[in-house]
Image (tube, rainbow, N blue to C red):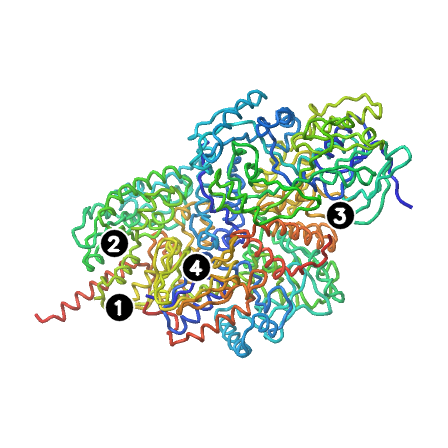
């Protein structure tokens, strides 16, 4: 047995107030789940310095972090559940599928290499049925497409020459599934006079943590921390376009590792919109945005909310003239990273996502905006509206403004 | 950056945020957790834990006479809001109703949602429990009820929700189950069968746990009313009560849709103060958030805004000095206190009642009211 | 006309001492009745550290006590396994303490025979991360943790199984004297007020701190000093092992892990009234300050409650004791026929929780002499039934942690509990989530002859011993009891109020920070949400 007697005294503060269980998206749709209160602070107290208790139900926790958000006492519930997952995985072992899903990066590399085939196969019913049988990935589940021309192939800069320097942690999703998001980010940065560098990086580890692969995830964490600290110590700001990745850097690395390096790095990490908002407050934001008469519904990812940064996407997109956007006030989308790809979790994933789909349907909007790729996947699974990343919208506005100013200029 | 920063996501924080946002202000709400509304009964009392009249509140909290008028406006505004968000509250501040709690003991409350009905002095009531929920047990409820209502004819029954739970099932869990039409019908069918078996004719009131659905509470209530041909009430008691959590859910969503910026999972640990004005508040992540005004709706000691130490009370929001009542010795000019943040004087059993919460929100709201834009699709 | 009960021996006091005596009598086949004014363990037996001394604490100052402790330590680990966790213990040297004492202590332990082992600091930090980084030396000893609640309950239960009888909530209000001496006691049922005459050949006063009161009822003047000490319960178990401060025994120098919590203490002050369980805020703070040298985080940790207990210290005016048989300087065993000319009355007091068995053995030896019974003591071999029940519950579909608890807790009730769990879903419901107590387990502790009492249940199941001190589970247990016809509505209401008030007492003195919030949450739930009126139906 490994030593999972990790140090966390946050559970000491639990008042048994039930807020975490009341807001846990899994608990709200399933009675099979032990709930954050029990699987978090209660189990920790029952096992701390005592005998280990393995609770299989921990598999249902999606590490969404809503329990952390709802706890008035700053109990790090999801940290406790993450370690409970690790204990469970250690005791019971890991399925092939979960190995695969944990290693999003490896899968990304491979799948994008064979993107046309991968994408085609993923839409074939027989293929999906075999996948369901072999891996336990539901045939009905929508899969994000893979891009052969992934971002890493395209973007090679590792340093910035501009005054403001940004080191971009791209993340698996923007690298392999939505390089256009990364492109848009670079574009937006360019319009703000900032050159983007892309440091060496590994998967943030979130899929690993979600599947109980704590040690593996922490290895990646240490790698990324080391790599990025080199940049921050040179004056770079670390910016990300995936809220789950940002959440990992800001919260999970600190809570799981409890190291000084993790804490140092966190101070330099920004979500993309958050960074732009920071620029605006510093008077350095490029406001030459062309009017856009779109109506957008904003979907707030759980890992955005958990960062405690307000709603930077709304703040920034609101600067576009004529652009109308409203937060649809929906709960968890239900995809929850790799959770939604699991056959035995699919039903729960769908139930969780139902209220989101209703909120999106209720919104008087042309398309949906969100920063999370996995949320996008669920949105595309459950709604009929297109989904855009805020960077895509911003880039579009900058470009449009440029074009219009060109036309307006005398020849 | 913001016109107002509100600390706290409890009832007072949410109301303040919504009302300010309705006036067009740029509002940010910073909170650690979701407020004690999650442990609340979902009804709004005058003096908590006490059968009291509004005059008692005025006297006890030494509120001024205008509060008599203000509460009507505040209540009306609150009712309009709850109506709008689809969870209508009602009640007359001068006529609190007597409701049954999940223990069977009775209490008076001033404002309450549609799922709450008063307890009659006489007549016939039926208490319905769920086999799976131990926070509401009919025989126990009956025993306590009959102490206050000896004339009441009380029948009890326990029915099954048809779903086992691997965790200790709460009323909220039951509420989510009842949202499912099949579960709801299954429950009502059992009730009707037991009614027939026990030869219970026409009771006036059915008493249920605070679990009559969550999103579909109205449908559950209607189905129950129609099929049971009687008034239906929830009996909120042991948290979590669906009665309260519906309110928070609706209020929070409304605030979000209106455009309030939620800084969640964020603890305010101090402030930068110059010239008796807060320039910025500082989070536990050393983030500075700036605003014109700062509204402290941190719920006092139970909410987390105040900590009781061996040597007295400590301000956990701005880090300022508190007197022995937990009140700011010197409150910065641009800081407004709402609800329990006004000190221990306005709390009883650790809480303010919902009535004072609404009144306090409304009074500070009107005191700093300026024109704002309403929500919906916006430009930021 | 009063009801009468006949027996051979009457044991007054349901603390660990009385329990031990009762069992020893039963094991020797002597008919006996134990009478306790409240629930078993009401006195000091449930108000202590729960430290199963290895003897290390007394090695330097009281060699004899050390020997007794170590000997009983070994016996109890073997004979009462269900109530003892073999945690091991550490003696830790901090800079503030006397350097010389370390070697002195080590030598003394070796002399007594207590196994001592030096632990590398790094290993110590790894095992016990909350230790001060400034510590200078760490030694391990075979300390253990005693669940003093289950110890008393199980010892009495075993005695009852062997034919003894126990009357709880029956207070001795009079000691019946006849020309030859004491011949019985008059007890009053605290719940019903009924008075019963219990007749026997010998009355054993095992009333602990109340011992002098009982002696006085027999017309005997007995001088006992009640040395009160405060203990604090921390919300979580921060230590795997018992942590002792390596210095001359004093205040605030022990941290004992007790299931899911850590008990820290203690202090010492003499009080007159054995019913004085009062708590002092100042005393608590001094204790925490002192303890911070050993465990710096102590000042930031959540305390869920505090309590106090009185050590009954016998002190005779004459230095030499010619009238009584002094077992050790800490244990007082008095045959009052010899000391005071009162036949049929024996007092046993002093000592430790750890040495209860030994005290009982010596006491019953005297009884056998007086009754001319040849039976020998075998409690050093006889095993109190284990609480382990891992062969049960495998097929029951229930929460892992709750099953885990039953594996280690169900004991002789395992079969009954398993039956309930299989038959009724509500019985599988976890009533107390912090301690994973199911209704089936609670039900197994209810008896027909005793009214519904949440404190009784708590002591037998740990119901409500979590951070919220029973806010949720007390209510649930009371309500389920009514639902299951195990209690009337009135009984449940009284029990609930009684339990809440009792819990509140322990929370009040530590009510800062989280515990202050927890107390207010409890108040809000009970006074606002459930509207259990303050003081309503309260009986004390």
| Chain holding disc 2 | A
Chain letter of disc 3?
Answer: C
Give x and y (percent) for residue C408: 61, 35
Coordinates of residue C510 in the picture (x, y in percent): 56, 50
**Which of the two marks, 1 or 3, is nearer to us in this view?**
3
Q: Secondary structure at mark 1?
A: loop
Discs 3/2, front: 3
Quadrant into which the C terminus of chain A falls: bottom left
What residue is rendered at 71% in x and 66% in y? B203
Please tell me whether residue A318 is drawn above or below residue C281 in the rendered image: below
Q: Earlier in the sequence, mark 2 or mark 1?
A: 2
Are callouts 4 and 2 both on one chain? no
Pick the front one: B294 or C284: C284
- Marks 1 and 2: in contact by CB < 8 Å? no
Q: Which mark is residue B155?
A: none
* Structural distance between the alpha carbons of marks 4 and 2: 42 Å
Residue indicated by mark 3: C451
Would you name the residue on which mark 2 appears?
A180
Q: CA distance from mark 3 to mark 2?
A: 72 Å
Label 1 or label 4, whichever lies nearer to me, is: 4
Q: With respect to residue C471, does C405 lie above or below?
A: above
Q: Secondary structure at mark 2?
A: helix
Q: Can see residue C87? A: yes
**Residue C250 placement: quadrant:** top right
Secondary structure beneath dot 4 equals loop
Apparent side of residue C17 relative to residue A12 in the rendered image (left or right): right
Host chain of mark 4: B
**Would residue C112 appear left or right of C317 to someone viewing this image?**
left
């Amino acid at each position: 047995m490994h030593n999972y007697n990790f140090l966390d005294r946050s559970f000491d503060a639990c008042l048994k107030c039930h807020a975490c269980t009341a807001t846990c998206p899994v608990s709200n749709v399933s009675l099979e789940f032990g709930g954050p209160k029990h699987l978090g602070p209660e189990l920790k107290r029952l096992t701390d310095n005592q005998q280990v208790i393995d609770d299989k139900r921990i598999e249902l926790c999606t590490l969404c972090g809503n329990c952390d958000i709802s706890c008035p006492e700053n109990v790090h519930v999801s940290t406790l559940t993450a370690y409970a997952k690790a204990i469970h995985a250690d005791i019971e072992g890991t399925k092939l599928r979960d190995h695969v899903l944990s290693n999003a990066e490896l899968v990304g590399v491979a799948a994008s290499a064979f993107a046309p085939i991968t994408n085609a196969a993923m839409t074939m019913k027989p293929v999906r049925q075999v996948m369901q049988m072999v891996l336990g990935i539901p045939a009905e589940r929508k899969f994000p497409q893979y891009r052969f021309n992934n971002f890493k192939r395209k973007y090679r800069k590792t340093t910035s020459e501009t005054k403001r320097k940004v080191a971009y942690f791209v993340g698996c999703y923007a690298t392999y599934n939505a390089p256009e998001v990364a492109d848009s980010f670079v574009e937006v940065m360019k319009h703000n006079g900032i050159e983007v560098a892309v440091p060496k990086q590994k998967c943030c580890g979130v899929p690993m943590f979600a599947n109980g692969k704590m040690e593996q995830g922490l290895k990646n964490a240490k790698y990324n921390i080391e790599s990025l600290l080199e940049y921050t110590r040179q004056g770079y700001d670390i910016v990300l376009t995936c809220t789950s990745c940002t959440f990992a850097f800001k919260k999970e690395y600190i809570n799981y590792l409890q190291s000084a390096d993790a804490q140092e790095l966190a101070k330099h990490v920004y979500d993309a919109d958050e960074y732009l908002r920071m620029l605006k407050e510093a008077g350095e934001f490029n406001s030459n945005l062309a009017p856009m008469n779109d109506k957008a519904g904003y979907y707030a990812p759980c890992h955005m909310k958990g960062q405690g940064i307000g709603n930077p996407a709304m703040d920034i997109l609101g600067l576009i003239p004529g652009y109308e956007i409203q937060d649809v006030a929906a709960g968890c989308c239900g995809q929850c990273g790799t959770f939604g790809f699991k056959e035995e979790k699919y039903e729960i994933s769908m139930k969780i996502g139902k209220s989101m789909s209703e909120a999106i349907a209720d919104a008087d909007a042309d398309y949906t905006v969100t920063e999370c790729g996995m949320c996008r996947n669920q949105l595309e699974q459950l709604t009929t509206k297109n989904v855009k990343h805020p960077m895509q919208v911003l880039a579009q506005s900058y470009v449009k403004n440029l074009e219009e100013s060109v036309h307006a200029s005398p020849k | 950056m913001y016109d107002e920063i509100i600390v706290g996501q409890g009832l007072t924080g949410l109301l303040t945020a919504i009302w300010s946002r309705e006036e067009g202000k740029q509002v940010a709400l910073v909170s650690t957790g979701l407020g004690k509304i999650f442990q609340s009964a979902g009804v709004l009392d005058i003096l908590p834990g006490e059968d009291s009249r509004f005059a008692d509140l005025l006297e006890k909290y030494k509120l001024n006479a205008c509060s008599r008028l203000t509460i009507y406006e505040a209540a009306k505004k609150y009712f309009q809001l709850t109506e709008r968000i689809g969870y209508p509250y009602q009640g007359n501040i001068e006529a609190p109703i007597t409701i049954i709690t999940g223990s069977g003991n009775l209490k008076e409350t001033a404002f309450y949602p549609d799922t709450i009905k008063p307890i009659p002095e006489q007549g016939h009531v039926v208490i319905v429990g769920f086999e799976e929920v131990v926070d509401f047990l009919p025989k126990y409820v009956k025993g306590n009820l009959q102490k206050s209502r000896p004339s009441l004819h009380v029948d009890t029954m326990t029915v099954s929700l048809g779903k086992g739970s691997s965790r200790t099932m709460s009323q909220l869990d039951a509420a989510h189950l009842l949202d499912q039409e099949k579960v709801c019908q299954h429950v009502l069918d059992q009730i009707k069968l037991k009614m027939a078996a026990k030869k219970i004719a026409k009771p006036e009131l059915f008493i249920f746990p605070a679990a009559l659905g969550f999103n579909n509470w109205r449908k559950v209530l209607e189905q129950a009313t129609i099929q049971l041909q009687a008034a239906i009430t929830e009996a909120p008691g042991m948290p979590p009560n669906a009665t309260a959590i519906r309110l928070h859910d609706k209020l929070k969503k409304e605030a979000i849709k209106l455009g309030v910026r939620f800084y969640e999972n964020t603890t305010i640990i101090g402030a930068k103060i110059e010239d008796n004005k807060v320039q910025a508040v500082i989070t536990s992540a050393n983030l500075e958030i700036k605003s014109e005004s700062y509204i402290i709706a941190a719920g006092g000691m139970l909410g987390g805004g105040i900590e009781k130490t061996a040597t007295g009370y400590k301000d956990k929001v701005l880090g300022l000095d508190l007197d022995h009542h937990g009140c700011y010795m010197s409150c910065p000019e641009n800081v407004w206190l709402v609800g329990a943040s006004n000190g221990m004087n306005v709390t009883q059993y650790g809480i303010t009642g919902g009535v004072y919460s609404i009144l306090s929100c409304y009074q500070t709201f009107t005191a700093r009211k300026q024109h704002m834009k309403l929500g919906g699709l916006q430009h930021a | 006309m009063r009801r009468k009960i006949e027996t051979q021996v009457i044991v007054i006091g349901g603390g660990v001492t009385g329990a031990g005596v009762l069992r020893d009598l039963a094991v020797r086949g002597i008919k006996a009745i134990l009478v306790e004014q409240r629930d078993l363990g009401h006195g000091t037996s449930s108000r202590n550290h729960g430290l199963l001394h290895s003897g290390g604490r007394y090695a330097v100052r009281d060699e004899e006590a050390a020997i007794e402790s170590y000997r009983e330590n070994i016996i109890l680990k073997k004979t009462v396994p269900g109530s003892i966790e073999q945690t091991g213990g550490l003696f830790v040297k901090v800079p503030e303490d006397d350097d010389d004492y370390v070697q002195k202590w080590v030598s003394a332990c070796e002399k007594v025979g207590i196994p001592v082992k030096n632990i590398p600091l790094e290993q110590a930090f790894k095992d016990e991360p909350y230790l001060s980084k400034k510590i200078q030396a760490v030694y391990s000893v075979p300390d253990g943790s005693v669940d003093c609640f289950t110890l008393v309950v199980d010892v009495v239960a075993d005695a009852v199984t062997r034919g003894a009888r126990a009357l709880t909530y029956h207070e001795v209000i009079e000691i019946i004297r006849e020309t030859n001496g004491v011949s019985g006691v008059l007890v009053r049922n605290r719940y019903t007020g009924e008075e019963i005459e219990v007749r026997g050949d010998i009355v054993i006063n095992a009333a602990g701190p109340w011992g002098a009161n009982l002696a006085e009822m027999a017309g005997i003047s007995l001088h006992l000093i009640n040395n009160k000490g405060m203990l604090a319960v921390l919300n979580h178990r921060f230590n795997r092992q018992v942590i002792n401060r390596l210095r001359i025994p004093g205040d605030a120098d022990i941290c004992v892990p007790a299931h899911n919590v850590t008990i820290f203490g203690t202090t010492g002050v003499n009080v007159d009234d054995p019913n004085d369980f009062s708590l002092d805020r100042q005393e608590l703070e001094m204790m925490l300050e002192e303890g911070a040298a050993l465990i710096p985080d102590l000042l930031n940790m959540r305390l869920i409650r505090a309590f106090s207990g009185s050590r009954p210290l016998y002190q005779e005016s004459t230095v030499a004791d010619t009238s009584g048989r002094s077992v050790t300087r800490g244990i007082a065993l008095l045959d009052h026929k010899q000391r005071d000319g009162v036949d049929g009355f024996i007092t046993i007091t002093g000592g430790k929780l750890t040495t209860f068995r030994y005290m009982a053995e010596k006491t019953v030896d005297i009884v056998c002499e007086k009754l001319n019974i040849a039976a020998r003591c075998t409690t050093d071999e006889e095993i109190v039934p284990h609480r382990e029940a891992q062969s049960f519950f495998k097929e029951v579909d229930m929460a892992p942690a709750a099953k885990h608890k039953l594996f280690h807790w169900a004991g002789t009730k395992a079969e009954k509990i398993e039956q309930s769990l299989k038959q009724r879903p509500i019985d599988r419901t976890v009533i107390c989530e912090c301690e994973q107590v199911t209704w089936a387990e609670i039900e197994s502790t209810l008896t027909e002859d005793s009214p519904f009492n949440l404190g009784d249940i708590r002591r037998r199941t740990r119901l409500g011993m979590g951070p919220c001190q029973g806010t949720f589970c007390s209510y649930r247990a009371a309500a389920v009891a009514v639902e299951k016809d195990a209690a009337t509505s009135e009984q449940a209401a009284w029990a609930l109020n009684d339990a809440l008030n009792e819990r509140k007492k322990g929370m009040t003195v530590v009510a800062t920070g989280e515990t202050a919030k927890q107390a207010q949450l409890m108040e809000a739930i009970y006074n606002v949400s459930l509207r259990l009126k303050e003081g309503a139906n309260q009986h004390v």
